[in-house]
Structures are given as C-alpha cells and as structure tokens.
Amino acid sequence: MLTALGLDPVAESVYRAMLSDPTSGVAGLVARVGRPVEEVRDALDVLSELALVRPSSEREGGLRAVSPDIGMEALLARQQAELAAQQLRLESSRSMAAQLIAEYADLRPASTTPGVEHLIGIDAIRETLARLTRYVATDVMAFLPGGAQPVEQLDASRPLDEELLGRGVRMRSVYLSSVRNDQHTVDYAHWLTRLGGQVRTVPSLPTRLIITDRTTAVIPVNSEDSGAAAVVLTGQGMLTALCALFETVWAGAQVLGEAVVRDGHGLNPQESATIALLAQGHTDEAIAKRLGVSQRTARRIATDLMGRLDARSRFEAGVRAVQQGWLPSEAV
C-alpha cells in the first residue's frame, strides 16, 4: 500500500505493528509480522532512514514509531524534493540534447539544392527514417517494392507500427502483388490491418518511397540499390507530385485479402504488368525485380503469356497484345 512512498511490504508491516504496539521489541515484531529477525532488522533500518522511527526516550535502546500524520508528511515532502531534483536533471538533459542535435545538424553537409538532403549509406538512411517516423503526426504513405519482406525486418517493424497506429497515425502501405504468396508478409499485413493500418497491392512499383505528414519524402537515388544512397525531399512542389503519385497508385491498387480480379481478357494484374514489360523489351531479370518474384517465376509467366498470344518473340508478343486489346498501341 505504501510502496509508492518508498516502503517495501516488510517495512510497512513492521511500521504498522509498531504503531499498534509501541512497546514491542524486535522479538515482538518478529512474532507480529511473521518474518525472520534479519528482515525485521533490515526493515527497521529502512524506517530509520525514512525518519519513521526514532529512538525512544522512555526505553533505553528502544525505538518508537513516528505518528502517521508527521511521518507521511515527511515522506511526501521527501518525494516532492526528489521529484524537483529529477525535474532539474531532466531539464538539464533536455538542454544538452538540444545542443547536441544542433551541433550534429551543423556538421551535416549542406545541400546545394533547397528542399533536398542527400543521405549516403544504409545507416544514414535508417537513422533518418527512424527520426521521421518518431515525430510523424498525421499519416505515413509507403511504396514497398522487393516482394516478400524478410521476417526479421517485419518483426522489427511491429513495435513502431503499433505505437504509431496507437496514437492515431494513418498508415497506408502498397506492396507488390507477389507478397500474396509469402505467408510471413501476409500475416504481418493482416496484423497491421487489425490495428488500423491499410495495405494494398499492385503488380509493380516505380520505386521505394516513404512520405510522412505529406511534408517529407525519402526516396532512393537508385531503385536497384535502395540502401546505397537516398534523398530527403521537403520542397512543396516535389511533395505535391509525389503525394499525387501515391494517391494514383493507391486508387488502382487492390486490398490485400480480397480475391485477385482478372480483367476482360482473363489477365490478372501481375500478368497485365508482365505483358507490358515484355512489350517494352525487359529481360526476365528486370521483370523479376519489378514484380518482386524469382527469375524462374518471371520466365514462367512470360512463357505462358507468349504461348497464349501464339508469339515466338517478345516483340511479337507486344504486337499481338496490342492487336488483341491487351495493351494500348503506344505500349509497343
């Protein structure tokens, strides 16, 4: 009951016993509280440090309990002093942290382009993303290419995602359609959805992208190696364009968990994207990266589509796809 005031259960029991029977010695207290003599003596030491017991003027070598009205007031005053000291230490720490942050900001290389900050290396990128998500206030929008996400990465994301959704941040994530075949990613997406996040899928994504509060975006310099370097964009014009891109992709994406819908030609979204990439002359390796699948899977999809089109080459597949209405004429 009095733990918050610094008394452990044994010390509290001893104090109450002394209030009930002021004449009890150590042996009497041991009998009343039912604890070993060593614990009772330790409790008396604690009570003495807290000024809840004092030497007795009537019994030489004995102790007496201070009345609760005086003792509790002293404990509260002591706690108040400790809180005031803690507050001073906190303010001092906050001031030193602010100074360090300002010094670190001054050490960052200045960008020659307003609204653009360059990040070199995966450590700098992760540090910036952690800082942005820590202070996000309203929403997070993300393109997450690369197909199935590593289990370790998904598990590491859960605490932060749960914290953001718990304080009302709107989270919208777009994955590649290929993640539907990875149970770990699907389980994570369903978990995120249950907490209030929104997850959709598309066959291919232009690049990795994270936008926070519609004011800051992080995008890799090279989509083929997103960990090598990235830029942080804050210019209004650039953010307006990137937010519009996200909303366009989001509107055409499919909610994860819904059945895959085929178009009027019997093509699912992944097949439609593949035939477009074939028509543009992409290799199996390039198609695999865009779809987030293995080269073997990309080759199988491409071969199946070429067979359905009765085409012997990729160029011929593109031409026949246009002739049959699978693609607009400008796609080839």
Image (cartoon, rainbow, N blue to C red):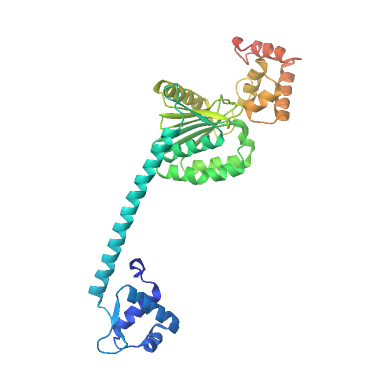
Front residue of 174 and 251: 174
Image x and y of residue 158, in percent: 52, 45
**What residue is shown at x 54% (from left), y 37% (from top)?**
123
Front residue of 118 and 183: 118
Residue furthest out toward the left = 69
Q: In which quarter of the image is the N terminus?
A: bottom left
Q: In which quarter of the image is the C terminus?
A: top right
Above or below 310: residue 23: below
Left or right: 198 with respect to 326? left
Q: In which quarter of the image is residue 63?
A: bottom left
Q: Quadrant of residue 29?
A: bottom left
Residue 136 appears in the picture as rendered: no
Above or below 328: residue 207: below
Residue 305 appears in the picture as rendered: yes
Image x and y of residue 303, in percent: 74, 22
Front residue of 109 and 296: 109
Question: Number of callouts in the render?
Answer: 0
Front residue of 321 and 259: 321
**What residue is shown at x 52% (from left), y 35% (from top)?**
124
**What residue is shown at x 37% (from left), y 45% (from top)?**
96
Image x and y of residue 129, in percent: 48, 36
Image x and y of residue 110, in percent: 44, 27
**What residue is shown at x 64% (from left), y 36% (from top)?**
181
